[in-house]
Amino acid sequence: MKNLGKIIIIFIMTLPAFASLSVSVDKASVTRGERVTFTLKISGEGKVRVPPLDSLCGYDIESRMQSRKDIYTNGKREQELSLMYEFMPQKSCVIEAFPVSVNDVEYMTEAINVNVSKMSISKNEPFEVQLEVDKHSVYVGEPFEMRVNFQQRNNIQAVGESISLPDSKNIWIKSEHKGKGFVKNGYQSRSNMYAMSAQQSGKLTLGPLRWDLQVRSRSRDYWGSFMQRAKTRSVFSNEIEIDVKPLPEGVDIVGDLQIKAYVDKKEIHAGEAVNITIEARGSANVEDIASFNIHLEGAQAFNEEPKVSHFLQNDKYFGTFVQKSALVAEKDFTIPAFELTYMDVATDEVRTIKTEPIAIKVINTAAAPTQELKVSRPQQEVKDVNAQKGGISTLEASFLLLGGVLLGLILGLIPWKNFVNKQKGKHKVSAKESKEVLQLLMSNMDNDAEIEGFVKKISENLYEGKSHEIDKKRLKEILKTLQA
């Protein structure tokens, strides 16, 4: 019952002089699946205020009715107001007392006990729902399977149904698989499978599940004609208790797992990308696996967000964790082993599994920058030729002057500018996406976020088949600056 302490006027009526107030239920003892009608009767005169009742005994109110009638006692007429609320308790409970105001005077109703007993299932029951689990003891986060078996007699036609699954913040339904129906021994049967996991240690109770069916029924009207109506039939399942154990400190993954890492190639060219995939698979809470951070000296890593999926296979839960990355390098490198620590439910021990290291060969590596070549020679004694010969003659000087003039004329006729530009052009790269452009950018991207952004886009376009838009104008400007 909600908001019992907050009185809101929902009935304001003028009645004869106040005489009595009473509460009752049509059945104090019911079988699970039966509905109980709670009635509040007020007879007398005055203004009546009743709190807004959303639930009774902890269960939602499914329908409401009200009636008024005149009653005569010792020749005196009195008016009686009856408020009726219908609900379906699943366990024994108490309808708590609540206040009712008449003529601004507050009165308290009496508390009422409602006893609920479990349904006795016999072979002739037209409907049945049964719960099964594959494990009765699990760790926090460990997946387990719950099977819900439905049966209904062949000669009964249901026009609609609804199922109430366990509603608890301490349990998570990972996936659902609805099975196909089949007929056996005069019953229509089917099973639904649910992969679940508990989120808190302790005792966990599954059920009872409620299966509501809209069933066709025939009845006669006032004139004796048959009428088709839909009647709601509620069926409850059994209950199952599961022991949920806490995980050791520092361990978040539990189940049965394998891990592997593989690449698309083990030999690449300098500036080319190698694609690596890390995959963890098994019956475990793979959604709790943290992404792997890849940091390699001498290589640039481009990591994607991990992808997690769940599915049922042969009535068993499985999950996969997949993370992909692209690695670009200029020299040989080794991808290290990746580790995953989890609670192994097969051995009931904490276990660490690893991938194998992967060596990557890089061919056509860029040459290391050359140092200035220093050549040393033994000092030789230089003799003064002019001193020995006493200088050059006038004739020799004339010939040297004439040779210099002729050499200057010859050199002036050669198109040196075009030749030099042609030689420089051989080492220029255009703004077209290519391995040469990628290599030039990678060697100059330290502490430059813009160049690093171009490296990422061009690398993914060249080696991952993506189609990022490249600002060619800006790329030309950067290349021009780098090649200046």
Image (cartoon, helix red, strand yellow):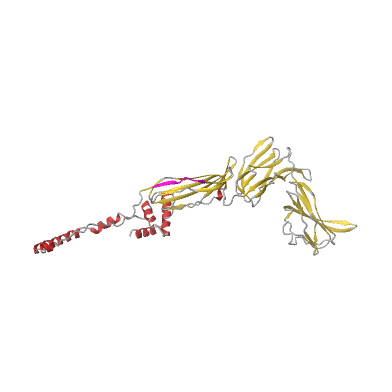
The span picked out in magenta is 353-361
In the image: residue 282, left or right of residue 105: left
Asked if the stretch drawn in magenta spans residue 318, the answer is no
Q: Residue furthest right?
A: 74
Q: Tag count in the figure?
A: 0
Q: Name the residue nearer the viewer: 12 or 35.
A: 35
In which quadrant of the rendered image does the N terminus lie? bottom right
Which residue lies at the image location 20% right of the left edge and 58% below the top edge?
414
Q: Name the residue nearer the viewer: 206 or 9.
A: 206
Q: Residue furthest top?
A: 185
Is residue 69 depicted above or below 343 in this figure?
below
Residue 301, how many percent across, how many down?
44, 52
Residue 333, how many percent across, how many down?
41, 49
Q: Name the residue nearer the viewer: 462 or 447.
A: 447
In which quadrant of the rendered image does the C terminus lie? bottom left
Residue 233, how many percent across, how many down?
72, 45
Which residue lies at the image location 42% right of the left edge and 46% below the top edge?
359
Which residue lies at the image location 54% right of the left edge and 50% below the top edge?
289
Image quadrant assignment for residue 229: top right
Residue 353, how many percent across, how many down?
52, 46
Residue 432 visible? The answer is no
Image quadrant assignment for residue 415: bottom left
Asked if the stretch drawn in magenta spans residue 359, the answer is yes
In the image: residue 5, left or right of residue 456: right
Is residue 329 depicted above or below 481 in this figure?
above
In the image: residue 111, left or right of residue 262: right
Majority secondary structure of magenta residues: strand
Residue 245 visible? The answer is yes
